[in-house]
Amino acid sequence: MVPPETPVSPLVTLAVGYGDRQVRDWARALFAFDAQMAGIVLQAREPMLAQIRLQWWHDVLAKPVASRPSANPVLAALAPIEADGLALTDALGPVIRGWEAALECEESEAVADFATGRGQLFAAFAGQGGDAADLQRIGQAWALWDMVRFHRRTSALDSAFAAVDAQALKRIALPARLRPLSIINRAVWLDIARGRLDRPWAGPGLFARLVWHGVTGR
């Protein structure tokens, strides 16, 4: 089953160019997986069809590598990081469930489930040297920010996003090898600090700051 494709964001494309080589490979694979889940949900005409596609991913990740569709590029990209020790069903099952909750993002409980589940994408990097609680905090903030900024707005999403603590994000210091996630964290808290989602995101100045952070950590 080939789901609708949603390309990774320009922020992710920038971020995965920095940091430890293994982390860059992990980030490319994991964010590509998230983009595929986003494509299923955000382009769905019928929630039931989206649920069927999401369940397919649940099922296929539980299969041995040799039993998975070999031509699927996302599965192919995930195979090496699974070989590195990441348990895909444990790491990505919550992400799939988070996107399933996003099918009902008019409800505050579903939005909380979405942020928690999708945020687990960042927690998958805990074995790479980051604190699991910090990574989960960044992941949840990014999940809401990315959805509200670029994809979908509901009152429940807006309320959850308004509760994100930008100062708490700013205080998080990740190791240099996790620079892709650090760049994303910085982009999120800088945007929240501006306080106006009606402004266009990014621009040369912001990208210059993110590149500088990617190179120097400052």
Image (cartoon, rainbow, N blue to C red):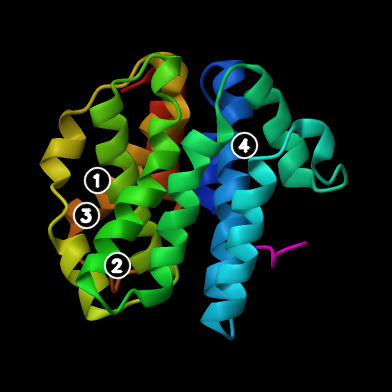
Residue under pointer 4: 28
Going by the image, does 146 lie left or right of 161? right
- Mark 3 residue type: Ile
Q: CA distance from mark 2 to mark 3?
A: 22 Å
Residue under pointer 3: 192
- The first of marks 2 and 4 along the sequence is 4
> x%, y% of residue 138?
29, 39
Q: Is residue 3 magenta?
A: yes
Residue under pointer 2: 110
Q: Is residue 32 magenta?
A: no
Q: Is residue 154 above or below residue 92?
A: below
- Mark 1 residue type: Trp
Neighbourhood count class around disc 4 (C-alpha, 10 Å): few under 14, some 14–19, many 20 upward: many
Q: Are the residues flagged by discs 1 and 3 in contact, CB closer than 8 Å?
A: yes
- Mark 4 residue type: Arg
Quadrant of the rendering where the C terminus is positioned: top left
Q: CA distance from mark 3 to mark 4?
A: 25 Å
